[in-house]
Image: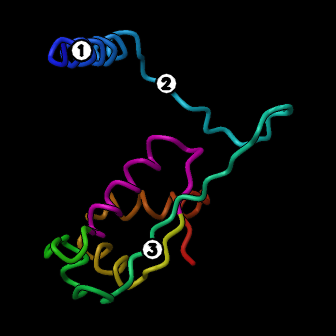
Amino acid sequence: MGNARTFSVFTFLLLFCFYGTLVSAYTKYNTGAGVVEGKLNVHLVPHSHDDVGWLKTVDQYYVGSNNTIQGACVENVLDSVVWSLQKDPNRKFVFAEIAFFHRWWVEQSPETQEQVKKLVAAGQLEFV
């Protein structure tokens, strides 16, 4: 009896999950500015907090090595932020750790540097 019940529950969960993947679709979020009356308006402020040399060395944080201490790769954060901001002009990001940004900046191509300057000028990328 116990095996039959376990099998039934497992089968139900499997079918439920499979059905969810069939009927789900990508939802594009409205990233436009503005308050929607009559709805709860939640504002998220994307940012990164990457202490320079807290648990790992600066190099380990930047390239993402020694993940036994903490999983962090600032280089990937900056790469993905710039890519995401370019894809959606309504997105914004705040970055504070200028030591990491400087290292990332000098490794970038002139084209990427120009794109970053445009993001800053447009108010999408902010430094605090």
Residue 47 coordinates in the image, percent (x, y): 51, 64
- Determine whether 48 is above or below 32 in the image: below
Identify the secondary structure beneath mark 3.
loop
> Magenta includes 81?
yes
Amino acid at dot 3: His
Residue 27 disc label: 2
Q: Position of residue 82 (x, y in %)?
A: 40, 55
The magenta stretch is: 72-93
Residue, disc 1: 5
Give the vertical position of 40 relative to 19 (above or below).
Answer: below
Look at discs 1 and 3 and give the one toward the viewer: 1
In the rendering, which numbered label is found on residue 52? none
**Residue most extreme to the front:** 1
Residue 33, by quadrant, is top right
Residue at 25% x, 77% y is: 61
Instruction: Please tell me whether mark 1 or mark 2 is closer to you in this view.
Output: 1
